[in-house]
Image (tube, grey):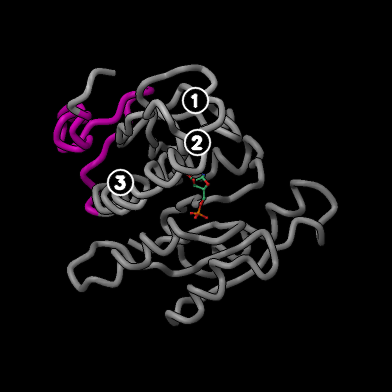
Amino acid sequence: MKVAILISGRGSNMRALMDAAAAPDFPAEICLVLSSVPGAGGLAVAAEAGLPVATVDHRDHAGREAFETALDARLAESGAELVCLAGFMRLLTAGFVARWTDRMLNIHPSLLPAFKGLHTHERAIAAGVRISGCTVHFVRADMDSGPILIQAAVPVLPDDTPERLGARVLAEEHRIYPEALRLVAERRIRVEGDRVTIDGHAAPGGALVNPLPTHTV
Ligand code: GRF
């Protein structure tokens, strides 16, 4: 399956997907890494690995529709069948999202539907939650919403800072995003309303979620 990755920054999730896809038996091929920000760190990493890269700078376009027309053109040219958002910091219009229904994934650093939006780790700590984590989901028009494919749980420790919690969550992001991409590229996923099935069964929790911590939470 040909996959385009959309980034705006350092691209560590992009790298996790790219590294997974480099394995000969991986069922997806990265056909484009596209950044909305010129000079984003991830672009150099992808180019160094020999992947096709492009920049579509939103500041060069008058409005979201014009920006997305340019995105559409790049995606069409690349032959992408699936889009993976990986730290892509532009909100997409309902029209763009509809064109990629069930063909666009996002990773978010919280256990959705909790803590949509930015500063998730600060907010998780401030809210006093004992467990946070990350989510890979199919993208719908509302920000950080859509059918959930995989989640991983990460304990929030008593002395956590947003940076420490964020680093532990990021390690789980790098684990579950390639796993989610594999499942989709193997065409084993069906989306029915808000629910995702794998091989016709409800998406399992235990098999894909890391073991919960042994201390009391
Ligand atoms: C990740 O935490 C991801 O969950 C969020 O944006 C961040 C991107 O980081 N959507 P990176 O660019 O993949 O390192």
Q: In this view, does 59 lie above or below 129?
A: below
- Front label number (1 vs 3): 1
Looking at the rendered image, the quarter that the C terminus falls into is top left
Q: Is residue 141 visible?
A: no
- In the image, the segment drawn in magenta is 186-213
Structural distance between the alpha carbons of marks 1 and 2: 8 Å
Q: Can residue 152 be seen in this view?
A: yes
Residue occupying image coordinates x 41% and y 64%:
15
Residue occupying image coordinates x 70% and y 67%:
38
Q: Do the residues labelled 1 and 3 touch (CB within 8 Å)?
A: no
Decide which of 64, 85 is in the foreground and name it. Answer: 85
Q: Is residue 14 left or right of residue 182?
A: right
Residue type highlighted by circle 1:
Ile
Q: Name the residue under label 3.
A: 176
Q: Is residue 72 above or below residue 130?
A: below
Residue occupying image coordinates x 58% and y 28%:
142
Q: Do the residues labelled 1 and 2 touch (CB within 8 Å)?
A: yes
Counting from the top left corner in percent of width and height, residue 187 is at 24, 48
**Which sits earlier in the primary sequence, circle 1 or circle 3?**
1
**Which sits earlier in the primary sequence, circle 3 or circle 2?**
2
Structural distance between the alpha carbons of marks 1 and 3: 22 Å
Q: Is mark 1 on a helix, strand or loop?
A: helix
Decide which of 32, 156 is in the foreground and name it. Answer: 156
Does residue 168 belong to the magenta stretch?
A: no
Structural distance between the alpha carbons of marks 3 and 2: 23 Å
